Image: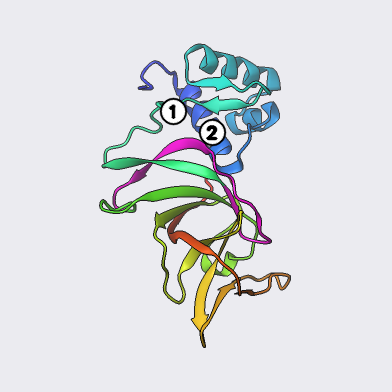
Amino acid sequence: MATSDLKPPELKGLQFIRNFVLYRGKSPSLRAIAEHMGFKSPRSSSLLINRLLKKGYLDRSPMGNLRLLKDAELPVRSEQTVELPLVGTVPCGLPLLAEENTEAWIPVSQRLAKPGAQYFLLRAVGDSMDQRGIHEGDLLLVRQQPVAENGDRVVALLGEEAMVKEFQRKSGKVMLMPRSSNPVHKPIILDSDFMIQGVVVDTLPNPIE
């Protein structure tokens, strides 16, 4: 879906809503939209959303949350891209249940997602990898592969729980190491079955922070 039918304020608002949903996993409040757009009243945000709904760029879930339409092209891009699935949220702190459902499809430059491999995106939660360049709200570009080398930032699956950590193998033991300024995070020594889902090759920093 091209965006030629959008007025500049509508395009600006749609880009903000899109980024907010992708990086936060929820809809922005009317007040947040108003602050970003420079509106004097949240009512102007409501009117903007209604226009975007009517033009088919957004819809609403049964719970009332805004959802992005898959084929909305934002922004217009001149370089070659590939559409990658955003697959739930992965914690960079204590392990939480991995989410399986694709939330959206996001265009990523082929300079990053190089042809010949499979990639997906995850939204980072927590601070256990802040010293390795992964912060709350970042989108992680993950190359699917079942193996890793020492020092790789990996997405590991233990049972039904996924986490991002630094991979280390020493003296026959495999460890998932946090790299954090927060001392609450501790190494995880893997003494049971686990799977490496992939290696984090890049991060897409949250543009709305």
Disc 2, SS: helix
Q: Is residue 97 above or below residue 151?
A: above
Q: Position of residue 5 (x, y in %)?
A: 39, 15
Q: Relative to the observer, which residue lies in front, 24 or 31?
A: 24
Q: Residue furthest right?
A: 184
Q: Relative to the observer, which residue lies in front, 168 or 35?
A: 168
> Would you say residue 41 is visible in this rendering?
no
Residue at position x 54%, y 52% in the image: 138
Residue 81 is drawn in which quadrant?
Answer: top left
Q: Position of residue 84 (x, y in %)?
A: 40, 42
Q: Which residues are magenta?
A: 89-111
Residue marked by disc 2? 16
Q: Is residue 38 above or below residue 52?
A: below
Total tally of numbered discs in the picture: 2
Mark 1: give few (<14), some (14-19) or many (20+) Cα within 10 Å.
some
Q: Amino acid at mark 1?
A: Lys
Q: Which numbered mark, 2 or 1, is in the foreground of this view? A: 1
Q: Residue furthest bottom?
A: 171
Q: Relative to the observer, which residue lies in front, 12 or 180?
A: 180
Residue at position x 42%, y 39% in the image: 106
Residue at position x 47%, y 25% in the image: 69
Residue marked by disc 1? 70
Which of the colour schemes (rainbow, by chain, secondary structure, one colour) is used? rainbow
Q: How far is the residue under mark 2 from the one under mark 1?
A: 16 Å
